[in-house]
Every structure is written in C-alpha cells, then in structure tokens.
Image: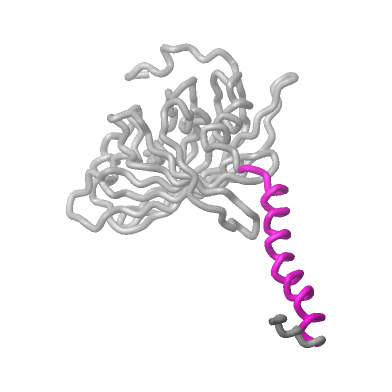
Amino acid sequence: MNAPLMPKRMRSFWPVALLLMWLPAAASAQEGREAKPRPAPRQVFTELLRPYRNLNDYTVKIRARVNMPAIRIPDFTATLFFKKPDRFHIETKNFAPLPKNSGLFNPFQFDPDQNLITYQRTASLDNAPAEVYRVEPRDGKSPVRYFTVWVGGSPLRILQVESLTFRETRALVKLSYVNVAEGPQAWLLPDKVHARITFPETGPNPAASPLTTEDNPISGGMRRLDQISGEGEIDIAYADWRVNTGLADSLFEKGN
C-alpha cells in the first residue's frame, strides 16, 4: 500500500522549516568558534603587574580631604614613600588617616603568587566595560578577607577596588591615573583616589585601625579613630612623582 502523498503546499514548506531550524544552530556554532577564550585570572593579573616589575620605589606628594562621621579632620598634605614589595612611610605634620589596604598604592598587592584570584562577572563601570575579580590574600595575617577588583581600560588597569576586612570594615576605592616617565621607562600611577569607607555600627571600633599607618606621628588621632562608626569618605590627590630613586631601607624602620 503506497504512503499517502504530502500535499503540495506542505512539500514546499518542509525544506523552509528545516532551514529555519538549522540557521540558529549554525549561527551559534559560528559564534562559539569566533569567541575568544577568556584569559585565566592568574594570567590577567600577571599582565597587570608586568609593567611595574621594574618599579622598586617611589616618592610622591599627597593632598587629602577626609570626611569622617563624628570626627573633624582638617585637610592635610604629606609625603608618601613606598619600597617594593610592601613598605610604606609617611612624613606629615598632621594626623593622616589613610586606608592601608586600599588608598595607598601598592602595585604588588594583587600579585597572583600571593592571592587566590577568581573571575566573577562582566560589568559596566562609568559606562565602560570592566571585568570583575575576587582576590583573596593567601597570607593568614592579612586583615582583609577579600577584595573585589574591577579591571578595564586600555592599557589594562585596575579601575576600582572594594575591600572587606575580617572586622567588617568595607572600603570602595576608585582610581584615576597619570602617566609618569622616568628616563626611558613609564608607569601608570594614581592621579586621584576616592575612597568610601563603611565601618560597622558598634561601640569602640577596633575596625577603624586599618586607616592609621604604623608610623603616624600623632597617636592621639588613633584613639579618635576608634570611635568611628557609619560611613566616611577620603579624597587623595597625588603630585610630583619620583620613581626608583634608591630609597634607603632605614627610612622604613620604625621611629623614622
């Protein structure tokens, strides 16, 4: 018994339906072949760090404006010294509360050998694309539980950092950069930094201690910082960068 013939209208429709079913799959496969694989997080941060490998030290003038709840802190100027990999020294005549783990620029802070780095998502930051990573220090003595780091721009740079300490202090830091040349070498270094810091709502607040550098000349300010709760802001402007001047180790010893 012969199978019934398909109506002529259906015979003309069937190849078209098959074509429509095939086109999305073919397009998806083509997109998959053309999409570039995402670099591994370790590779991304290795490339971020590469331009700074030959930065051994720096000296820079800073001007800071601090708005902290319940504490009046006058605007201040200071000279900030850094020596690789993580030593800081501040010279100032004023009380200078600065975020140790977020506001002071250390290009080696997110070294992939010292941190566990995982990709989180793609985001828009100031109407520009950015990749967001979670960075967890491997050092058990670190006061920071983890950082969230926004990476973008050309050349690639760190655009924003959010840190959360084990004492629940949160700091959101946004950076802008300037190109600093020293002879034939050049680096992208901070021009301005804005930090929004949120302290846990408690009584006496040991979580405020990350704001105070160890060599701060005014210890009375440390006692006042212990009283902070709520949210505050710090704006820092950098000027007169000097790089690789051969800063002495003695400069970073306590008491200097």
* Residue 167 coordinates in the image, percent (x, y): 25, 45
Residue 148's place in the image compared with 182, above or below, is below
* Residue 189 coordinates in the image, percent (x, y): 61, 34
Residue 182's place in the image compared with 64, above or below, is above
Q: Is residue 57 left or right of residue 171?
A: right
Image quarter (top left, top right, bottom left or bottom right) of the N terminus: bottom right
Q: Residue at x 40, y 18 (%)?
A: 252
Q: Is residue 199 left or right of residue 11?
A: left
Image quarter (top left, top right, bottom left or bottom right) of the C terminus: top left
Q: Residue at x 33, y 19 (%)?
A: 254
Q: Residue at x 65, y 29 (%)?
A: 187
* Residue 193 coordinates in the image, percent (x, y): 53, 45
Q: Is residue 187 left or right of residue 225?
A: right
Q: Residue at x 39, y 52 (%)?
A: 197
Magenta portion: prevailing SS class:
helix
Front one among 57 and 137: 137
